[in-house]
Amino acid sequence: MIFIGERINTGFKDVKQAVLDKDPGPLQSWAKKQTEAGASYLDVNLGAVSSKAADMCWMIETVQQAVDTPVCVDTNKPAILAEAIKACRPGMLINSTTAAAEKLDSMMPIAAEHDASIIGVVMDETGTPKNADKRVENAGAILAKAMELGIEPQRVFLDPIVMPLKFMQEQAKEVLEAVRQFLLFSDPPPHIVCGLSNISSGTTQKKLISRIFLAMAIGSGMDAAICDVMDTELVNAALTAELAMNREIYADSYVRK
Amino acid sequence: MELVDVKEKWANRISTVTIGATAAEGGTRGSTVTVGGETTLPLLTFEGEIPHRPVIAGIVTDVVPDWPDVLKDAIGEVINSPADWAKKCVEEFKVDLISLKLIGADPAGAKRSPAEAAETVKAVLEAVDVPLIFWGCGDEETDSTVLPERSQAARGENCLVGSATETNYRTLGAIGTADKHKVIAEAPVDINIGKQVNILLQDAGFSLEDTVMCQTTAALGYGFDYVYTIFERVRIAGLKGDKLMALPQIANVGWEVWKVKEAIQDDDILPGWGKLAMRGPLWEATSATGYLQAGADILTLAHPQSIALVRNAIDEFMANEGARE
């Protein structure tokens, strides 16, 4: 399972304040804690705090000083990405492009040039798909662009776009169906990822809903998630689901303490 | 027409383990042996990196084992002296390192004291300058009390010590850390326990970068196919990215083969099976080359003829590097 730690994001107050003060402490502390918890990548998101690429580079460099875990550069602005990626050590992940032509043409070449992996969110100019078929169609466009630029499918992380269960209940099933179909694109298939917290948005049972949905998504073929890696029950549910899918070799002490 | 490139690209690399320490590294070995580091399946030199050849460890014991005469005779008089035997293994049989099995402490056998075993370790280290693997007698309770003394006798020599199991991993981890040795993690023909022992060792603070995996038996006639499959699955899991399984593996071939009926009984008892003098070493060499293909990085062998055969096989397999580019 590829866990992408979500915590270094200015949407969280402590991180926002740290970026404003240029205080490396909180970022490095989250970098270490999430790495110890088993994160394969650390998402780094500047959010709306600043529009300066230099600030994103500072965040990345600060994180990389603390840990070896590769970063997941979280921005939808090509100008920021083009600068930020130069600050990244090899093995980075870009979060993200969409299937919209303008995004594909601006984000994908950066991934190709820097040998980066990239998350492809399956929305396009018309917005977020309402059903599995449109999600698969958009995923196809993303993979086609990747192939054209020589990015192999294993460097693409397809994101089927998880919607809040509370407000768009019918979408969860469509997402799981799309995941199953993504597996058919190539052998080995592309990675399949989601921003997990969306599923429980606005609910009173956030952890339970996230945990169950992630297990179901893994059962459908998902192998990565941007999530709260500090939530041990969530991580252990995912590890158990992976065993049930025969993706990992069982050992008595497979859970994280 | 352009051919499609079907080469497999794996996500992970098997860890690299170096055994032995030269004077510069605080030991007295003339050279070291490094295994692991593969980025592809065994012997597929055209597909990925295999930076280190599989190696052969010559078996030496402190008490003469219950072996057939064809094996004892092939080794010769030196079988009565671990130091001389080790010397012959290196100088005549041309092994890469020594695998010293200290069976003398076995409470059901010679009941040798920890001090005697420690002397044997010292004597072998003085007689040869290749790296050393040493194992306990297999009786876990005895090994837990005597292994520390042997380990201290070889302190700083960066030996590979066997073996940590689900129950004694703390002792072996502590020995490895205190005396700077590498450790063999052993499981009873069980991939799940194999992974479990690795987790336990790691949780006890011992680095898996310093660990080699072992699946107890490695002989044709003792569940060859089970063990072969485990070697293969361990390697594939490791290459796919399971860091708990991305470890070099040792196949204790010789030690196991010379217990198998077909490798030790002559054709007066097994009519039609051919003369033991040829069948025994062939049995050992066949088992070893099988595990070579399954993913073994270290093979232990006893008979000089099978050592020669397996060394030739390794030479030929590894000589293919780049040939199919």
Image (tube, coloured by chain):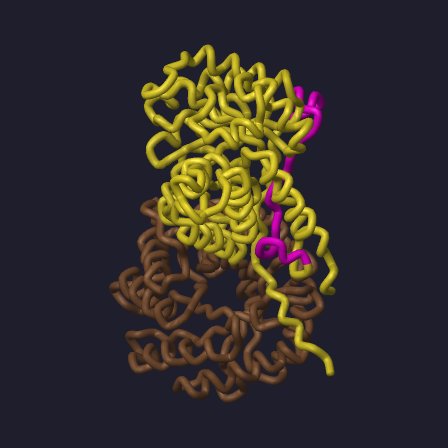
Chain colours: A brown, B yellow
* Residue A217 spot, x, y in % from top left: 36, 70
Residue B140 falls left or right of residue B117 = left
* Residue A52 spot, x, y in % from top left: 65, 63
Span highlighted in magenta in the image: B21-45
Closer to us: B20 or A5: B20
* Residue B178 spot, x, y in % from top left: 50, 22
Q: Is residue A241 above or below residue B207?
A: below
Closer to us: A150 or B111: B111
Closer to us: A177 or A44: A177
Residue A38 falls left or right of residue B282 = left
Q: Is residue B36 magenta?
A: yes
Q: Is residue B61 visible?
A: yes
Residue B270 falls left or right of residue A47 = left
Q: Is residue B52 visible?
A: no
Q: Which residue is located at x 54 percent, y 33 percent? A: B302
Q: Is residue A246 magenta?
A: no
Q: Is residue B107 above or below residue A235?
A: above
* Number of numbered tags placed on the structure image: 0
Residue A204, by quadrant, is bottom left
**Which quadrant: the C terminus of chain B?**
bottom right
Q: Is residue A221 above or below residue B215?
A: below
Q: Is residue B121 above or below residue A239?
A: above
Closer to us: B164 or A27: B164
Q: Which residue is located at x 30 percent, y 74 percent? A: A165
Could you tell me what secondary structure mostly forms the magenta stretch?
Answer: loop
Q: Which residue is located at x 63 percent, y 78 percent? A: A147
**Which quadrant: the N terminus of chain B?**
bottom right
Q: Which residue is located at x 60 percent, y 56 percent? A: B40
Residue A8 falls left or right of residue A173 = right
* Residue B297 spot, x, y in % from top left: 57, 44
